[in-house]
Image: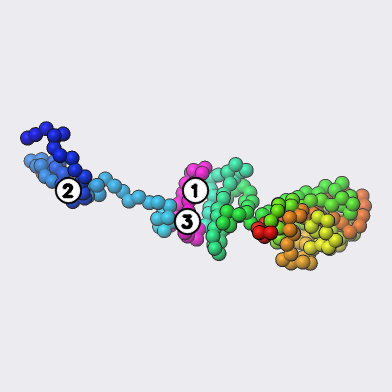
Amino acid sequence: MAIIYTYPTVTPTANDLVLLTDTSDSQKATKSATIASVIGLGTAEVYDLQKTLDNGTISTGSDNAVASINYEIDVTCSGISLSSDKNIGISATGSAGIRLVSGTGPLSDITFNGTSAVKMKKVGLNNINLQALNVTPIELVAAPGAGQAIQVLSIYGFLDYTAPAFAAEDLRIRSFGSSSYLGEFDTPFTSASADKREVWKVLSPGSWIDNAKLEIYATGALGGGGSTLTLFITYLVIDTGA
């Protein structure tokens, strides 16, 4: 028998044969098997992300898991605390819906086709801000930039009462420099003598604010009250292409 390395080299196929020892045979007989059958013995089924989703659930401990998924999914975060350097970023095309099912930490932006869309922001006004609000408006959302616009979805206000009460004046929301306004918190919201929650009244639903900041102002002097106001704004940033 020639030395093995002197035999010709070929590219094997699945049906080619290899020699092996049959350990189930008491004589340890030499037998042959196809290459395909040998490969099949040592290869577990490989599950890529899509196949895993097809079969139910997926769990990952990676800080940087990236995937392209053609599926409707729920994202559940457990055992982690989301922070500014560990966020959930998901992009969707078409009419796909995305929701965070559970988890700890903030959920800020949701993106569609890689462009930031739904945003949420919290703005606090102390009593000094409120006392001067008819003269000095407070910015709620910064101007988004050229070719972009803001569309406000909702504004929720919480007045944390501290005596004395403010005067009764409307709080209005407008784009910077505009002579008209998009909506308001009606009186007697500002003059409440107890903690009060209120949702703004929309006067111009669906209106866009083209590359201008969103601000709040008072229609008149609120006086020397002691309360503070926290606002929660949900809005869209729209690519106008202008």
On screen, residue 116 above or below 81 = below
Between 94 and 167, the residue placed more toward the observer is: 94
Disc 1/disc 2 C-alpha distance (Å): 39 Å
Please name the residue that numbered disc 1 is placed on: 66
User: What's the residue at 7%, 35% (across, down)?
Assistant: 1
Magenta residues (range)? 56-73
Secondary structure category for the residue under label 2: loop
Amino acid tagged 3: Ile
Name the mark nearer the viewer: 1 or 2: 2
Magenta segment includes 63: yes
Amino acid tagged 2: Asp
Between 198 and 231, the residue placed more toward the observer is: 231
Which mark identifies residue 16?
2
Say if mark 2 contacts mark 3, CB within 8 Å. Answer: no
Amino acid tagged 1: Val
Tell me residue 196's x, y (percent): 80, 57
Q: Earlier in the sequence, mark 1 or mark 2?
A: 2
Tell me residue 84's x, y (percent): 62, 43
Tell me residue 154's x, y (percent): 72, 61
Asked whether, in this view, residue 87 is left or right of residue 149, the answer is left
Note whether residue 225 is visible: no
User: What's the residue at 90%, 52% (across, down)?
Assistant: 135
The quadrant of the image that shows the C terminus is bottom right
Note whether residue 57 is visible: yes
Between 20 and 74, the residue placed more toward the observer is: 20
Which mark identifies residue 69?
3
Q: What's the image's color scheme?
A: rainbow
User: What's the residue at 79%, 63% (across, down)?
Assistant: 183
Residue projecting furthest to the top: 3
